[in-house]
Image (cartoon, coloured by chain):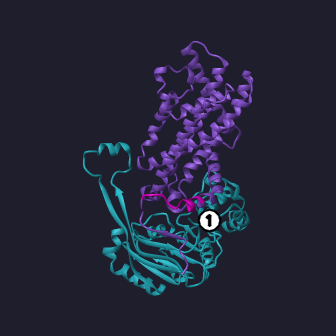
Amino acid sequence: MNLPSVSNSHKTNEIAVSVRGLGLTYTTAIDRRPTLKARVKSLGRGGKQTRVIRALDEVNLDVEYGQVLGIIGSNGAGKSSLMRVIAGILPPTQGRVEVYGSVSTLLALGVGFNPSMSGRDNVYLGGLAAGMSRVEIDSHFEEIAEFSELGDAIDAPMRTYSSGMYARLAFSVAATVRPDILIVDEALSTGDAKFKEKSLNRIKELRSDDRALILVSHAMATLEDVCNDVAWLHKGKLVQRGEPKTVIDAYREFLQVGKSAAIDEDV
Amino acid sequence: MSTPTQVYEPFRAGLPPLRRYWKSLWSRRTFIAEYSRSELREQHFDSAFGQLWLVLNPLLLSAVYFLLIVIIRGSSDSTRYAHLTATLFLFYLVANSLTGGVKSITAGQRLILNTAFPRIMLPISAVVIAIFKFLPTLAVFLVIRTVLGLPYSWQMLWAIPVLLITMLLALGLAVTISCINVYFRDIASFLPYMTRTLLYLSPILYEAADLKPKLKTLELFNPLFPILDSWSRALVHGQAPISSHLLIALGWAVGIFLVGTYFFLSREREFAVRL
């Protein structure tokens, strides 16, 4: 499980995450919800109707400390699934994932938040959910509040917040956790342009030699700016990995060429 | 090269490494507390009227049931009312753990899909919430007891081990049912009927000693039977519970807790896929 605040004793180029032959399949039921009633009704009518989806297929990927890895690919490429396996949320179906250090995830904003509580209470709730201790949150509270630019609204219930305010507070909490390995899934595109830039800067600050960052994004320019390595996933397979510019150009070209075939099926 | 802190391999049935699991759970105890507190607050139990409702609700319930007893039996006395309130309040600790626990995993979907943490935390929070709801009713019972003029005695301290056993049972039940609900979502709709049946099978509207010999086998299948009887003996009558009842209760609680927790822990890595 992810415990931040572990002393960062990792050196650059030491391995942070090793993914070997990773495969992930989902078996989704056609039925809306698994119920006892449905199970009883289908007794004697043969097998359950299911569809098998191959989300990840033979993915090999190493992430080293000091690396900022961008993950690109069209919708349904398996990016989020890969992040969830590395974070230990989804168990792999095949292969092996080794993680060397504490992991923190920023897969969705405001996880653990309770809208009926004040922003202040949610800073604690969200921070604790992310694995921080109460003392750590205490010592960072001012910083979080200031970063979120909420002012007095921090003591108002979160259900009164605009979606932008909500996202700003959520990002501020998440960006305070200082894990060895940070996984961010499309959480950068929050708030207005000004806050976007601010959060991007925060991500840049988090880059350091003893930390590994994995960013999932569709914002190519941002990734080219922030990352020193990019991996491109397509339909669960790793297509290309390397220099940000090279991979992103290849991906862009692929998008242009395959516009009729590859892109439209995701629409 | 150093050893990995975490290794994820294909899901296998069986328990995760328990020591690490426990450590991880323990490190999140403040989160459990805060999470429970926020849920309680969402149900408005931080306000004066919310607190009042917390006490008023079981009190009104006990009044309704007392009316029922008086009508059916033709008469009643203060001991019977004390018995009814004491056992009803404890029953609601278990019932609230079940109703809170059943949806704890399915309702925590967002949390489960986006963070790695010991999933058992969610049913634990449900039980913590039920305990917080129970405590004020215990105070109310002591007031009722004093008003009714029942004598106090040291034997009443037997209520403490009985309460601990009940909490363990409630936890075991909450863990079990939260896990079952992941696979069969309609269990939540059956639950009210199950708790209602359990209520009538337990010595709440009647005392265990009043039960006809023919119906005595009931107590063998109901873990709440020995618990509620011991609870009433200690708190209402000021007597030591029957020791075999205490042992049976403990056996049920430990058994359900162990089986439910095993079931839960061996399945929980799969929850994220199932939600």
Question: Foreground: B13 or A243?
Answer: B13
Residue at x 36%, y 58% (from the top left corner)? A28
Task: Judge whether residue B137 can be spotted in this image.
Answer: no
**Which span of residues is magenta-colored?**
B13-22
Residue at x 48%, y 58% (from the top left corner)? B15
Residue B74 sits inside the magenta stretch: no
**Residue lying furthest top:** B74
Residue B24 x/y as whole percent: 59, 61
- Above or below — where is A48 with respect to A247? above
Give the number of callouts: 1
Residue A50 x/y as whole percent: 31, 56
In terms of image quadrants, where is residue B30? bottom right
Drawn side of residue A88 relative to residue B127, left or right: left
Residue at x 48%, y 77% (from the top left corner)? A18
Question: Foreground: B168 or A142?
Answer: B168
In the picture, the quarter occupied by the C terminus of chain A is bottom left
Chain where mark 1 sits: A
In terms of image quadrants, where is residue A30? bottom left
**Residue lying furthest front:** B244
- Above or below — where is A239 with respect to B159? below
The chain coloured purple is B
Question: Foreground: B7 or A140?
Answer: B7
Q: Find chain A in the image and tell me its colour.
A: cyan
Residue B86 x/y as whole percent: 64, 29
Task: Judge whether residue B36 can be spotted in this image.
Answer: yes
Residue B15 sits inside the magenta stretch: yes
Residue B107 x/y as whole percent: 51, 50
Give SS at disc 1.
helix
Q: Amino acid at mark 1?
A: Arg
Q: Which residue is mark 1?
A: A168
Question: Foreground: B245 or A207?
Answer: B245
